């Protein structure tokens, strides 16, 4: 199953001590590149998150963003008289030196109380991050699969156009060969007449036959594209095999035992482009030249589409 490298996933974990939100943004990259944007309070989750993403994804530039909100517990605390007397006594000592010091506001008192509240165990924040990550990663992988299916369908449609061109060239080959043979025969007649204006009195039969054979061999090498067409059809068969939508036994990482489909596709398109170039160099007609150009254009489209395949 083909997966795209472009997707987004978001997950949230709500706990009694606060809420953690994690967002994953993934775009195409040659390798797996994970970048973090985490507040200092959640830095302890960076290594576990990286390990999890590495186990589930094989390629792509993934940006991990996380933020948290603590539960407002200050209102649950009562301000005792002792705490107020303590603040008043400290304020009196300050005013002896700085008489203009204003009295603290109610929100200031709550802030002081908050700083005295028990701190949340870091392991609880880590657990919340992992829970949010599970949701975000599930959404990210699902998005990569959906986009991968769309890319696969688009590539199959392009491959069908390439197959149509290859079939047309195969069907036209007998006519093209016949036309080229006639052109070769005319060229040979003109060459022989120019070389031997007085006839064949100065050339033996075997020598004439050898020259004709050499010209025929050169002609055959120049226009015989059967091998290139066969290889192109074989590459199209391999492309369809790679793109077919099969369930994956390991849906996270591993695009099964085939390895990275994106890298295999890149190599396959290089080979297809090589055959198209050879076809163009052997083109013996305008139709063949146009077919070679169209093939290269469609192969380039495939390469662009495959750049986003994991």
Image (cartoon, helix red, strand yellow):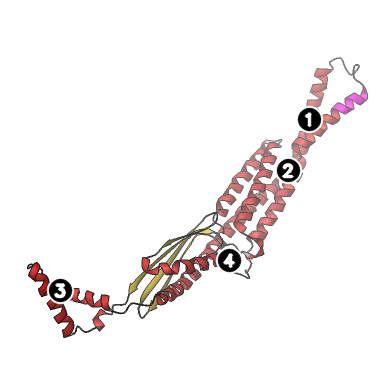
Q: Residue at x 90, y 16 (%)?
A: 202
Which is in the foreground here, disc 1 or disc 2?
A: 1
The residue sitting at the top extreme is 198
Which sits earlier in the primary sequence, circle 4 or circle 3? 3
Which comes before the other along the chain, label 4 or label 2? 2
In the picture of the structure, the residue carrying the numbered disc 2 is 172
Task: State whether residue 31 appears in this view.
Answer: yes
Q: Nearer the viewer, mark 3 or mark 2?
A: 3
Numbered tag placed on residue 184 in the rendering: 1
Q: Which residues are magenta?
A: 204-211
- Residue 120, image x, y percentages: 35, 77
Distance of mark 3 from mark 1, alpha carbons?
102 Å
Q: Earlier in the sequence, mark 1 or mark 2?
A: 2
Quarter of the image where one finds residue 104: bottom left
Q: Which residue is mark 3?
A: 105
> Seen in the image, is 208 located left or right of residue 289?
right
Instruction: Give 108 or 163, whichever is nearer the viewer.
Output: 108
Q: Rounded to the nearest whole Å, what is the CA distance between mark 4 and mark 3?
A: 55 Å
Find residue 305 and report its horizontal and vertical position in percent.
Answer: 56, 53
Sequence-wise, which precedes: disc 3 or disc 2? 3
Mark 3 or mark 1, earlier in chain: 3
Residue at image location 61% in from the left, 70% down from the top: 250
Q: CA distance from mark 1 to mark 2?
A: 18 Å
Does the residue at mark 1 contact the one at mark 4 (Cβ under 8 Å)?
no
Q: Which residue is mark 4?
A: 253
| Residue count near mark 4 (Cα–Cα under 10 Å), binned few <14, some 14–19, many ≥20 | many
Judging depth in this view, the residue of 112 and 50 nearest the camera is: 112
Q: Compared with residue 295, is residue 252 higher up or lower down, i.e. above or below?
A: below
Q: Residues within 10 Å of mark 3 (few under 14, many from 20)?
A: few
């Amino acid at each position: 199953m083909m997966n795209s490298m472009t997707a987004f996933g978001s997950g949230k974990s709500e706990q009694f001590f606060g809420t953690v939100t994690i967002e994953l943004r993934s775009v195409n990259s040659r390798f797996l590149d994970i970048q973090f944007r985490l507040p200092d309070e959640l830095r302890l989750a960076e290594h576990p998150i990286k390990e999890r993403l590495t186990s589930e994804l094989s390629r792509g530039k993934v940006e991990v963003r996380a933020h948290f909100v603590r539960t407002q517990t200050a209102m649950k605390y009562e301000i005792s008289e002792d705490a107020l007397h303590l603040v008043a006594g400290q304020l009196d000592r300050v005013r002896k030196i700085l008489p203009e010091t204003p009295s603290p506001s109610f929100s200031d008192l709550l802030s002081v109380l908050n700083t005295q509240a028990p701190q949340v165990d870091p392991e609880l924040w880590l657990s919340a991050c992992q829970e949010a990550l599970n949701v975000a990663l599930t959404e990210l992988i699902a998005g990569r699969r959906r986009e991968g299916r769309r890319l696969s369908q688009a590539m199959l449609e392009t491959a069908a156009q390439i197959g149509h061109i290859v079939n047309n060239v195969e069907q036209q080959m007998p006519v093209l060969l016949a036309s080229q043979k006639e052109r070769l025969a005319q060229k040979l007649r003109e060459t022989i007449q120019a070389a031997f204006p007085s006839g064949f009195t100065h050339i033996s039969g075997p020598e004439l036959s050898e020259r004709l054979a050499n010209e025929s061999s050169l002609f055959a090498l120049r226009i015989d594209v059967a091998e290139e067409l066969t290889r192109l059809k074989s590459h199209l068969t391999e492309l369809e095999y790679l793109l077919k939508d099969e369930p994956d036994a390991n849906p996270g990482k591993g695009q099964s035992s085939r390895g990275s489909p994106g890298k295999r596709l890149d190599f396959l398109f290089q080979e297809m482009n090589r055959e198209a170039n050879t076809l163009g160099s052997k083109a013996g007609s305008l139709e063949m030249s146009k077919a070679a150009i169209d093939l290269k254009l469609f192969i380039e489209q495939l390469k662009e589409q495959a750049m986003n395949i994991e």
